[in-house]
Image (spheres, rainbow, N blue to C red):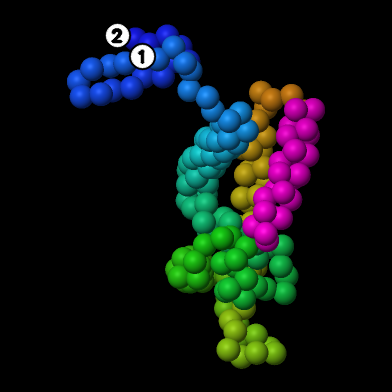
Amino acid sequence: MSAPRGSRVRVARGSVCVSAQPRVRKHDEVLETRLWLRLLACYNLVEAELRNHLREAFGSTLARFDVLMQLERSPDGLAMGELSQRLMVTKGNITDVIGRLEGDGLVERRRDPVDARIQRVYLTPAGQRSVDDMLPAHNRRLAELMRGAERHDLEALDELLGRLRSVLREARKA
């Protein structure tokens, strides 16, 4: 037995009751949930493609790429804690990735000149060459993935997501 669209279905010990009254949902709650699920789905689709691309083209992982990109933007190096905050992962995860990158000669750790308790991480020349190879290919792959969208739609989405990020940051402070 199928219920009419929008009606509520209740099950009571083996029997199905169909109510003509549709379940009332608050529009705003449904909208936010739908938006969150769409953002998550888009993120998952893009992330899977980027992971595959980095693995196939460079034998790298997305985590390694993300660390290298953060270090490339920070010529004065970054403390391990700063890296974990920027990438929103635990310090343990960063320590593991940094250890592997260091073993491959792409980064180096040095004591902070002001506070010797802090280790700062820097790109090596080999790490910079790796970034110089991966970043343009990464950007091209993103452009390929989004090629089907109109440019003005992407620009509007960029603006809207920037505003949403600001709203979410403010909500976290409250």
Query: Residue at label 1?
Result: 18
Q: Main secondary structure of the magenta part?
A: helix
Type of amino acid under label 1: Val
Question: 44 or 163, which lies in front?
Answer: 163
Q: Residue 105: image x %, image y %?
A: 53, 69
**82 versus 60 height, above or below:** below
**Quarter of the image that includes the C terminus:** bottom right
Question: 139 or 128, which lies in front?
Answer: 139
Asked if residue 90 is among those painted magenta in the image, a careful observer would answer no
Asked if residue 168 is among those painted magenta in the image, a careful observer would answer yes
Query: Residue at label 2?
Result: 1
Query: Which class describes the residues within 10 Å of circle 2: few (<14), some (14-19), or many (20+)?
Result: few
Q: Secondary structure at mark 2?
A: loop
Query: Which class describes the residues within 10 Å of circle 1: few (<14), some (14-19), or many (20+)?
Result: some
| Residue at image coords 52%, 24% | 24
For the residues bearing labels 2 and 1, Cβ distance under 8 angstroms: yes
Question: 65 or 56, which lies in front?
Answer: 65
**110 versus 104 height, above or below:** below
Type of amino acid under label 2: Met
Whether residue 35 appears in this view of the structure is no
* Furthest-left residue in this view: 14
Q: Secondary structure at mark 1?
A: strand
Name the mark nearer the viewer: 2 or 1.
1
Name which quarter of the figure residue 138 lies in: top right
| Residue at image coords 66%, 23% | 148
13 vs 137, left or right, is left
Name which quarter of the figure residue 156 lies in: top right
| Magenta part of the chain | 152-174
| Residue at image coords 75%, 38% | 160
